Amino acid sequence: MIFRKLIVGPLGTNCYIFGSDETGEVVVIDPGGNADKIIASIEELGGKPIAVLLTHGHFDHTTKVGRMLRHFQIPLMYSRKEYDFGTFTQKEADRWLVEGDIISVGEITLHTLETPGHSPGSLCFYSTDVKEFNGKAIDGIVFSGDLIFRGSIGRSDFQGGDQKALFSSIKTKIMYNKNLTDNMILCSGHMELTTIGIERASNMFRKYFL
């Protein structure tokens, strides 16, 4: 697996470079700032970008989308609900993503989950093909955007946010998704990495989604 978390932009957004160490193919998830830093990291990793994926359309996750697309000549993928609602309108997607869609990154399969609440078209991406992280056995990896964080949850007071929908998304798509386990790494849009199990046990909002 190729994996790197970069903290970018004025709000400390997590941008992820993720992909296959067999083929070198990578996706860039949420390029919210510091384009030169992202490009340099991809080059250092020997990555071959195949797409930009957006978990949602807020500016702190999308500021350098155009730069990535122009530099690497790759497609943009996100939810049409973000475009139609007006959360992100700078560029239509080359591929509109919906629940169940698959993105193949070398031998790794990323699955798409629709997880509204933080914004109408928020998405999460997960893979069960990743079995090791920092020398420890895991069951997979989830890129959760601003749905859930280490010890907390995403805001729902922005335009298009919905707290009831956010708790429902965490409950049905993460905590009680039969394809996900507690031993999966959660890579959120801000703050540190965590696991589903840690958040089930200690997230301060857990009573609302368990």
Image: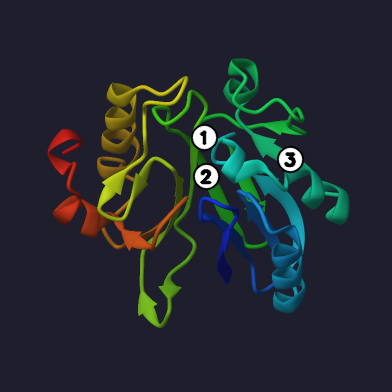
- Distance CA(mark 2)–CA(mark 1): 6 Å
Which residue type does callout 1 highlight? Gly
Q: For residue 76, which numbered disc appears in the image?
A: 3
Q: Earlier in the sequence, mark 2 or mark 1?
A: 1
Q: Position of residue 115 (x, y in %)?
A: 42, 32
**Helix, strand or loop at mark 3:** strand
At a point 43% along the width and 74% down the height, the residue shown is: 133
The label nearer to you, 3 versus 2, is 3
**Relative to the observer, which residue lies in front, 74 or 33?**
33
Proximity of marks 2 and 1: CB atoms separated by less than 8 Å:
yes
Which residue type does callout 3 highlight? Leu
Q: Position of residue 41 (x, y in %)?
A: 69, 71
**Farthest bottom residue in view:** 135
Proximity of marks 3 and 2: CB atoms separated by less than 8 Å:
no
- Distance CA(mark 3)–CA(mark 1): 17 Å
The label nearer to you, 3 versus 1, is 3
Residue on which disc 1 sits: 100
At a point 77% along the width and 33% down the height, the residue shown is: 94
| Left or right: where 190 falls relative to 18 | left
Which residue type does callout 2 highlight? His
Q: Position of residue 6 (x, y in %)?
A: 57, 64
| Left or right: where 132 falls relative to 102 | left
